[in-house]
Image (cartoon, rainbow, N blue to C red):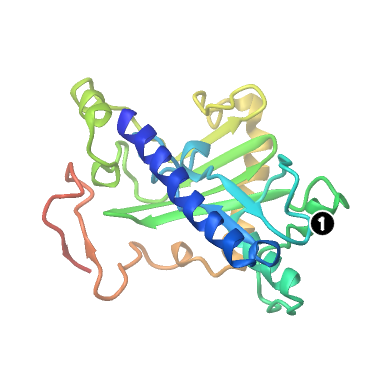
Amino acid sequence: MARYTLSVKTLDEKMGIVLDALRASGLEKDTLVVCTTDHGIPFPRMKCTLTDDGIGVYLIMRGPHGFSGGRLIDALVSHVDIYPTLCECAGIDPPTWLEGKSLLPLIRGDTEEINERIFAEVTYHAAYEPQRCTRSKRWKYIRRYDGRSGPVLPNCDDGESKTALFRHGWFAVEEEALFDLLYDPHETCNLARDPRYASDLSKERRSLREWMERTADPLLGPLPVPAPIGAKVNSPDGYSPSEKSVGG
């Protein structure tokens, strides 16, 4: 955690250099700065998972078209919404096949939400670990497609917390998980097997399936999904991403 805090400090300093350069060059008012990241914090049950700790990333935007004033907007958005936003800011018609939606209605105050739900996925990281999820304001549904009952350890960065969990038995993973984010924001209580939530589970399953069909998800075809041509992957039965990988 100390090393992570240091990396945050370093990032803040480097961002300051970029912003100072924009100001000094006279381009500050005409430049939309987008700052985000590709995954959540690199700790066990976070990075390379579909919990909010894994898919929840910061998104800070500053510049013209209303991206100013230090506002916090708590709407449900996804990275796929950034490109349509850039298109609208630049006055460019977005491609008709885009999944995302422009953020500008949120910025203008025209609406409080642009998405009823968002979706996320993992197929390969260091090793094969196919998962899909759907998340609404209230519910998170995660489905795994590898038939494993334990974690894929090469997909978790090495570190003290990983070592400690491994020494104490780690944690099991389940094929399906349903979390009520209103009462369980840290996603600790899986409700998928609770008959009281059967209707909610069915709705989330259907939503995920419809998205997978709409996007021609490869998990709907023969399994396992092959690795990209030329990729190097770890065995899902290994321990560390630094172990010898094999060609995909």
In the image shown, does 43 or 185 lie closer to the viewer? 43
Pointer 1 local density, CA inside 10 Å: few below 14, some 14–19, many at least 20? some
In the image shown, does 224 or 91 lie closer to the viewer? 91
Q: Which residue is rendered at x = 39% and y = 43% of the image?
A: 10
Q: Is residue 102 above or below residue 150?
A: below
Rendered location of residue 77, percent (x, y): 66, 50
Any part of residue 186 in sight? yes
Circle 1 SS class: helix
Q: Residue furthest right?
A: 110
Which residue does the numbered mark 1 point to in the structure image? 105
Q: Quadrant of the C terminus?
A: bottom left
In the image shown, does 208 or 193 lie closer to the viewer? 208
Q: Is residue 220 above or below residue 75?
A: below
Any part of residue 37 in sight? no
Q: Is residue 189 above or below residue 66?
A: above
In the image shown, does 166 or 237 lie closer to the viewer? 166
Q: Which residue is rendered at x = 28% and y = 76% of the image?
A: 229
Specify whether 243 is left or right of 43: left
Rendered location of residue 221, percent (x, y): 44, 68
The quarter holding residue 62 reads bottom right
Q: Which residue is rendered at x = 57% and y = 25% of the image?
A: 194
Q: Residue furthest left?
A: 244
